[in-house]
């Protein structure tokens, strides 16, 4: 998949390499996914590292976050992501990421950008068709699996529905880049965490060695969304093809699995 087919030509210009979701969100709802280009950090964080927890120079991270803030014309709210299911509600009194430990966030306020950092995990953005609320979720395998069939995506959907007084048929979801199904090797325990809750999840695991599996993270996310009632026409973005894989596109994406010491990208969604 090419850059232009990922991008929506009707959206405002960002850095040429950033991804803009191509989805039928209301015109006052904006979203973007940063790549590793456009910042000031030195290797191995070159150049647009947005993570302040990866041992990059603090001045560089502050400068990179300023680049993002200026580009989107909104305030990106960064979370302390802990691979859980907690959803933070953002408002003007809660924009301090230092006190916000969560793996998803939702807001109805214009000018606040729900922001998720990733370097292999799956970012998922949500809005309702009226654009009353926007949300972002960080779906690593632990948060996605959750427990008893409920993980971070289920929690985010509940939060959007509550904030927008909506229901699932009125929602849209966009899946961003993440580690792809040819790169995400996991053990039996990861497969069991999904299959024990939902037998259909076995279709998104392929055996690659004794006790080892290749997992399709966006495929598992789409399965969870379908179980929640999302139709295929409500879900956009990552289709599990190679162009979306953070591991196999080193010039474009940071990848913790590939490099260990690396930067972080951000998926942002906000209202004008």
Image (spheres, rainbow, N blue to C red):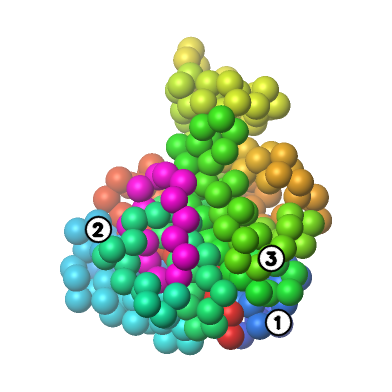
Bounds of the magenta span? 77-90
Q: In the displayed structure, does residue 98 sit left or right of residue 180?
A: left
User: Quarter-wise, where is residue 150 in the image?
Assistant: top right
Please tell me which residue is depicted at 60% across the width and 26% down the height of the picture.
197
Residue at image point 59% right, 33% down: 149
Whether residue 271 is visible to the viewer of this picture, yes or no, is: yes
Marks 3 and 2 sit apart, C-alpha to C-alpha, by 36 Å
Q: State the residue position of label 1.
A: 27
Whichever of callouts 1 and 2 sits on the residue coming sooner in the sequence is 1
Mark 3, Cα crowd under 10 Å, few <14 / some 14-19 / many 20+, is few
What SS does tag 3 mark? loop
**Relative horizontal placement of residue 95, taking residue 25 as reference (left or right):** left
In the picture of the structure, the residue carrying the numbered disc 3 is 165
Label whose residue precedes the other's in the sequence (3 or 1): 1
- Residue located 47% across and 78% down the image: 112
Q: How many labels does the image show?
A: 3
Dot 3 or dot 2, earlier in sequence: 2
Q: In which quarter of the image is the N terminus?
A: bottom right
Q: Is residue 56 above or below residue 211?
A: below
Specify the principal SS of the magenta part: loop
Label 2, secondary structure: give it: loop
Query: Image check: 227 left or right of 56?
Result: right
Q: Where is residue 166 in the image (x, y as percent from the top left)?
A: 72, 63
Nearer to us of marks 3 and 1 is 3
Q: How far apart are marks 3 and 1 (CA)?
A: 20 Å
Q: Check disc 2 and report the residue beneath it.
A: 53
């Amino acid at each position: 998949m090419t850059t232009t087919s990922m991008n929506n030509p009707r959206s405002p210009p960002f850095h040429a390499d950033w991804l803009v979701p191509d989805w039928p969100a209301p015109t006052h709802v904006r979203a973007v996914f940063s790549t590793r280009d456009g910042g000031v950090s030195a290797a191995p964080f070159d150049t647009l590292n947005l993570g302040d927890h990866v041992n990059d120079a603090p001045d560089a991270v502050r400068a990179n976050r300023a680049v993002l803030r200026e580009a989107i014309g909104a305030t990106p709210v960064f979370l302390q992501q802990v691979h859980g299911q907690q959803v933070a509600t953002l408002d003007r009194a809660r924009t301090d990421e230092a006190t916000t430990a969560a793996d998803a966030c939702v807001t109805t306020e214009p000018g606040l950008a729900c922001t998720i950092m990733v370097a292999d995990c799956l970012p998922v953005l949500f809005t309702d068709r009226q654009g009353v609320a926007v949300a972002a979720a960080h779906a690593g395998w632990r948060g996605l699996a959750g427990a008893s069939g409920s993980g971070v995506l289920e929690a985010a959907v509940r939060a959007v529905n509550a904030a927008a007084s909506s229901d699932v048929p009125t929602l849209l979801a966009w899946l961003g880049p993440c580690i792809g199904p040819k790169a995400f090797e996991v053990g039996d325990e990861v497969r069991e965490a999904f299959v024990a809750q939902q037998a259909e999840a076995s279709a998104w695991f392929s055996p690659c060695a004794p006790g080892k599996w290749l997992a399709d993270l966006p495929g598992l996310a789409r399965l969870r969304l379908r179980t929640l009632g999302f139709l295929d026409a409500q879900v956009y973005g990552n289709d599990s093809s190679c162009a979306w894989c953070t591991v196999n596109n080193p010039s474009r994406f940071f990848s913790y699995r590939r490099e260990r010491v690396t930067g972080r990208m951000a998926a942002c969604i906000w209202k004008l």
